């Protein structure tokens, strides 16, 4: 029997839809970059599921138990035990968010001449790897690159290509292999346990450590329980333990499946690597037992790591996102299928067949959603990934997507059906759009701070 969310609302936060003229003015002022729109001027904010979740009454109570001692605080031990509990890893380095952990890890191991493969690197992971000189290589299976192919585990690593890469380069050239669960860049698609095990075995045969980018480990485990027959009778907690048992280390943004508003960690089995990273942690984040977080944050996250593994929660969470996908489809919107765990990805190519990649069709769609209904999503297309080739031509992103990420425990079914209706309206008016051109672009992570103008 179908079940609704296993919680009710105890506190509300007002939101408001600004008028059309006001929305248009905000867009112009923001240089058509939705990252620059004031959050107060956004009605339904689906920019990210990162740090935007609602905490439970137990997490809010946990804040009050926060121990703010500088070193070896009580809250640190709660956090440590929680992370060690589900990762099975002895060494935990707390940090203020995922990319801080990535920076600390890759400042130590990413160097020019090295290659770091993954299913798909998330944008901050790729940027950190490339900043320190290594190549970030994406090896997702072919199914994962086809936006309409129905396949249960589109986040899987192509094990054949992984084997070939490691054979060709060897352990000296590959400091580690990552696997992102769920695969955010590839559409929030899950990775099967068979694939995690297979990748881990290939890595270990070649003497290469295998790491998880574990931001959405619980959502991934839920998909494994639903879609991988071998695990249908295992509990999510057991599946989580089995996923991590294949890994030598993990980075995590606890702003996702930590159900917190801030936080992250690096977890490792290798004590030597942990000690090598400790100095960098102290230099960049803070002492080893708080890493840039307040004691109360550590407390709330320790509680969040527990709640996120509850199956009634995961069922409602992943179910809400799937229903949102169905609603969008019923309004004629083309989406990436099957729907992933935390977001629905709209395919902008069929909406704007006449807008070329260098005029950013996906950004055009993202801007139109805000203009039409005060909805904020994020472009994952040629604005994020497109490059100028050395000969001056434009190398587009493989896909032109708009991600509508669903914050955890925040919006109701009617909020999301409103968004689906707005998207339907945008599709009807698609013929009026001509795309955008860049008027300012920073040297990397372009999508966060660039400015655009409509093409006339
Ligand atoms: C969010 C995210 C990160 C980065 O974490 P931040 O907390 O935003 O710095 C890294 N990898 C993946 C897969 C993510 O989703």
Image: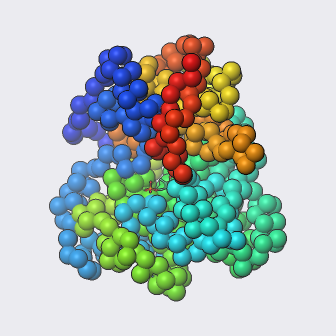
Report the label total.
Answer: 0
**Residue 260 horizontal/vertical position (percent):** 34, 54
Q: Quadrant of residue 25?
A: top left
Q: Residue at x 70, y 39 (%)?
A: 394
Residue 456 visible in the shown view: yes
Is 413 rendered above or below residue 429? below
**Above or below: residue 216 compared with residue 209:** above
Q: Residue at x 32, y 77 (%)?
A: 287
**Percent position of residue 242, x then y:** 57, 67
Picture quadrant where residue 391 is located: top right
Residue 248 is at least partly visible in this image: no
- Give the quadrant of the C terminus: top right
Whole-percent x and y of residue 248?
58, 75
Q: How is the image coloured?
A: rainbow
Q: Is residue 281 left or right of residue 139?
A: left
Residue at x-position 28% and y-position 39%: 8
Judging depth in this view, the residue of 38 and 255 nearest the camera is 38
Residue 130 in picture, x, y percent from top left: 60, 62
| Picture quadrant of residue 168 | bottom right
**Which is more toward the observer, 262 or 361?**
361
Residue under the image location 56 percent in, 63 percent down: 131
Q: Is 389 on the left-hand or right-hand side of 75?
A: right
- Residue positioned most to the left: 64
291 shown above or below 435: below
Residue closest to the eye, 334 or 168:
168
């Amino acid at each position: 029997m179908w079940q609704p969310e296993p919680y009710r609302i105890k506190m509300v936060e007002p939101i408001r839809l600004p008028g059309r003229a006001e929305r248009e003015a905000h867009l112009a002022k923001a240089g058509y970059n939705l990252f620059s729109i004031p959050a107060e001027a956004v009605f339904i904010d689906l920019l990210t599921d990162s740090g935007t979740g609602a905490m439970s009454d137990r997490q809010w109570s946990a804040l009050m138990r926060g121990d703010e001692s500088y070193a070896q605080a009580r809250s640190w031990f709660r956090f440590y035990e929680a992370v060690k509990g589900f990762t099975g890893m002895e060494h935990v380095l707390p940090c203020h968010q995922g990319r801080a952990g990535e920076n600390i890890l890759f400042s130590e191991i990413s160097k020019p001449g090295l290659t770091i493969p993954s299913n798909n690197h998330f944008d901050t992971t790729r940027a950190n790897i490339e900043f320190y000189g290594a190549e970030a290589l994406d090896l997702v299976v072919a199914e994962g690159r086809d936006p309409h192919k129905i396949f249960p585990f589109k986040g899987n690593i192509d094990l054949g290509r992984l084997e070939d890469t490691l054979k060709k380069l060897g352990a000296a050239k590959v400091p580690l292999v990552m696997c992102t669960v769920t695969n955010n860049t590839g559409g929030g698609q899950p990775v099967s346990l068979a694939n995690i095990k297979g990748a881990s075995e290939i890595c270990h045969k070649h003497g290469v450590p295998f790491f998880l980018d574990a931001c959405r480990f619980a959502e991934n485990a839920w998909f494994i329980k639903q879609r991988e027959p071998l695990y249908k009778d295992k509990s999510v907690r057991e599946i989580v333990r089995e996923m991590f048992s294949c890994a030598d280390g993990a980075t995590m943004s606890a702003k996702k499946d930590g159900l917190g508003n801030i936080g992250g960690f690096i977890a490792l089995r290798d004590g030597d690597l942990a000690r090598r990273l400790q100095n960098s942690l102290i230099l960049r984040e803070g002492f080893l037992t708080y890493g840039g977080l307040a004691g109360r944050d550590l407390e709330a996250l320790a509680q969040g790591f527990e709640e996120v593994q509850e199956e009634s929660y995961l069922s409602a969470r992943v179910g809400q996102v799937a229903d949102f996908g169905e609603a969008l489809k019923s309004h004629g919107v083309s989406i990436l299928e099957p729907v992933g765990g935390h977001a629905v990805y709209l395919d902008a190519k069929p909406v704007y067949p006449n807008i070329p990649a260098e005029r950013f069709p996906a950004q055009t769609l993202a801007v139109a959603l805000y203009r039409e209904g005060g909805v904020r999503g994020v472009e994952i297309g040629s604005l994020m990934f497109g490059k100028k080739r050395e000969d001056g031509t434009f190398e587009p992103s493989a896909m032109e997507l708009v991600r509508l990420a669903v914050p955890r425990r925040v919006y109701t079914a009617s909020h999301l059906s409103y968004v689906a209706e707005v998207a339907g309206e945008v599709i009807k008016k698609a013929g009026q759009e001509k795309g955008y051109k860049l008027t300012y672009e920073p040297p990397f992570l372009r999508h966060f701070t660039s400015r655009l103008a409509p093409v006339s």
